[in-house]
Image (cartoon, rainbow, N blue to C red):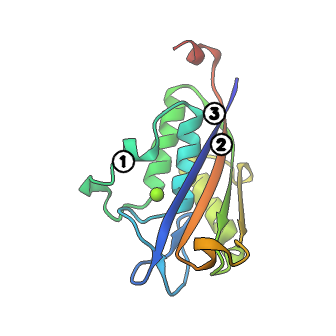
């Protein structure tokens, strides 16, 4: 039975931090602020996967008060989400995500982001979609105060898992 999940995340753009999205360090004059590496794209994908299996969000698995996750690479959050799926004998069918940012240009990095997310989830790269768009200069994205990401995940779970 196919289950779907949705994920959304946003982190603030600040000076003095690396900009890491989809596990790719992108050259930019600002980076995303957060307890971990603040990879909003991976966090959104992680929440989509966890949502599809009816689990709590990324913060419940990896509290941002826990020093273990300070500056942690978000790949480990995705690996844990994939492990949770496997534990339920589930199979991730695909994930799809959208980044919203005025700058920098994301397109040159999209293939590397897909490869990183696919590797962390144990998926073929063809099962990972990533798009990037601007916010047409409007709002907090337009003012370059932060970068949001949204994602969906489709997961095939065995029937017995539904009877919990
Ligand atoms: Mg986050």
- Looking at the rendered image, the disc whose residue lies closer to the viewer, 1 or 3, is 1
Contact (CB < 8 A) between labels 1 and 3? no
Sooner in the amino-acid sequence: mark 1 or mark 2: 1
Residue 24 seen by the camera? no
Disc 2 Cβ-to-ligand 1 distance below 8 Å? no
Q: CA distance from mark 1 to mark 2?
A: 20 Å
**Res. 153 mark:** 2
Query: For the point 65% across and 64% down, which residue is it?
Result: 99
Sooner in the amino-acid sequence: mark 2 or mark 3: 3
Contact (CB < 8 A) between labels 2 and 3? no
Query: For the point 63% across and 20% down, which residue is it?
Result: 158
Residue 53, percent from left and from top? 56, 31
Q: CA distance from mark 2 to mark 3?
A: 11 Å
Vertical side of 25 occupied by 57: above or below? above
Disc 3 Cβ-to-ligand 1 distance below 8 Å? no
Residue at numbered disc 3: 91
Vertical side of 163 occupied by 17: above or below? below
Q: Secondary structure at mark 1?
A: loop
Judge the density around disc 2: few (<14), some (14-19), many (≥20) Cα neighbours within 10 Å: many
**Res. 40 mark:** none
Residue at numbered disc 1: 62
Sooner in the amino-acid sequence: mark 1 or mark 3: 1
Q: Secondary structure at mark 2?
A: strand
Quick one: which residue is furthest to the front in this view? 139
Q: CA distance from mark 1 to mark 3?
A: 22 Å
């Amino acid at each position: 039975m196919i289950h779907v999940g949705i994920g959304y995340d946003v982190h603030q753009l600040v000076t003095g931090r690396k900009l890491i999205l989809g596990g790719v360090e992108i050259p930019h004059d600002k980076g995303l602020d957060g307890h971990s590496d603040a990879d909003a794209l991976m966090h959104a994908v992680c929440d989509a996967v966890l949502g599809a299996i009816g689990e709590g969000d990324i913060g419940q698995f990896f509290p941002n008060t826990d020093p273990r996750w300070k500056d942690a690479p978000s790949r480990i959050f995705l690996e844990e989400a994939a492990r949770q799926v496997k534990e339920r004998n589930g199979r991730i069918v695909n994930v799809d995500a959208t980044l919203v940012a005025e700058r920098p240009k994301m397109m040159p990095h999209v293939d590397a982001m897909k490869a990183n997310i696919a590797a962390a989830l144990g998926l073929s790269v063809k099962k990972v979609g990533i798009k990037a768009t601007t916010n047409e200069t409007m709002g907090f994205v337009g003012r370059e105060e932060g970068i949001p990401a949204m994602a969906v995940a489709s997961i095939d779970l065995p029937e017995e898992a539904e009877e919990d």
